[in-house]
Amino acid sequence: MLKYILVVLLLIHAVAHLPGFFKALNPASVTQLTRSVSSPAGIMWLFAALIFIASLVLLLTGRGEWYYALAAGVIISQVMIIFFWQDARYGTILNVIFLCTAVLAFGMHRFENGFMSDVNKENERASRVKEEILTENDLLHLPAVVQKYIRMSGATGKPKLKSMKVVFKGQMREKGKDYFDFESVQYNFFDQPSRLFFMKAQMFGLTVPGYHRFMNNNASMDIRLFGMIPVVYQSGNAMNRTETVTLFNDMCLLAPASLISKNITWEETDSLAVKAFFTMGENTISAVLYFNDKGELISFRSEDRTDVNKNRQYPFSTPVHGYMEYAGRKVISSGDAVWHYEDGEFTYGKFNLKEIVYNPAKVH
């Protein structure tokens, strides 16, 4: 909505610069301007209008450079307004709004570019890993129910996983607060396990981006208003262990083929449940995986994850609500993220899968 309000304001502002150009061409044609306009000044008025139109087009087409064009347009426009202050001074109001918008957009884009820079580095490394096909022999060391799950997912006979891209839409909340909407895109890499998760939350009409980064066994959570103003930052040993659980949860729910990893050891509990121990660096975490008779994973539960808001470790689970066919594989369609507090279960996240790509050729 805010995007289209900005488009309308840009169009109005661009049109408002044209009288200066027409006044230079034919002084008698524009009576609302009291000062005469020279030919060079008329060209500058036109130039400012065209740059505002260009920023509008770039914005509508999703090009990141739109805020550079907007800032350039503001500078030229404001210089002309100063020279023609008596007639054009009210245009300063929109120029201030546009300049603030350009600065905020730049901050958001730079923050997201940090995420994409990490993704490109990881993808470049993963692309050099030799491609192999997942066969039945790769499953032999796994518990029977895990083998069944991997087959059910449609992973056998396809390339082993080097990476994946996942897009979610959903809702999140803190305890005692209302849900807020979010969209997220994440990239996971499996040869040297890493998880890069970028989320855009909608809170109080504002977009608040957050970046969960887990590379080289080091995790951080960085949430910034407008991509510039720090809101939350977490790192350290507890965060490393927590993100190890989250990464393993991704492997179990979103990438069954990755469960052949030698970093996992298994302990069968019954025919429809197994306990897994996953090791990354100094951290070994455990989780219990629950399945139904069809071989579908229906829940994941770990005791090793820390709620950063409370700075305490609580049982954590991710019940799955359904499966769907997507690009030749069977994948989860939706699920929840749940804390198990002393006073009962608290669902803090609802996730709906919108896109999943295994071994993407390009990242964007």
Image (cartoon, helix red, strand yellow):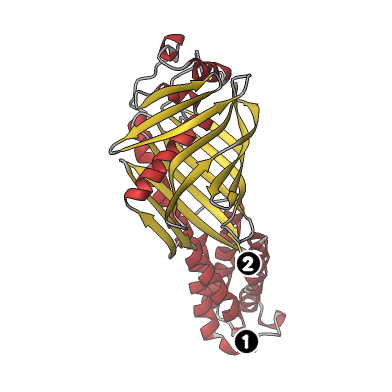
Residue shown at 46% from the left, 45% from the top: 197
Residue 193 placement: quadrant: top left
Q: Earlier in the sequence, mark 2 or mark 1?
A: 2
Residue shown at 58% from the left, 65% from the top: 52
Q: Nearer the viewer, residue 287 or 171?
A: 287
The amino acid sitting under disc 2 is: Leu
* Residue occupied by mark 2: 10
Mark 2 surroundings within 10 Å by alpha-carbon count, few (fewer than 14), some (14 through 19), many (20 or more): many
Query: What percent of the width, then of the height, locates residue 29?
Result: 71, 79
Q: Secondary structure at mark 1?
A: helix
Residue shown at 70% from the left, 81% from the top: 30
Residue 122 placement: quadrant: top left
Q: Secondary structure at mark 2?
A: helix
- Left or right? Give the position of 214 relative to 147: left
Number of numbered discs on residues: 2
Residue shown at 54% from the left, 18% from the top: 271
Query: What percent of the width, then of the height, locates residue 74?
Result: 52, 72
* Residue occupied by mark 1: 87
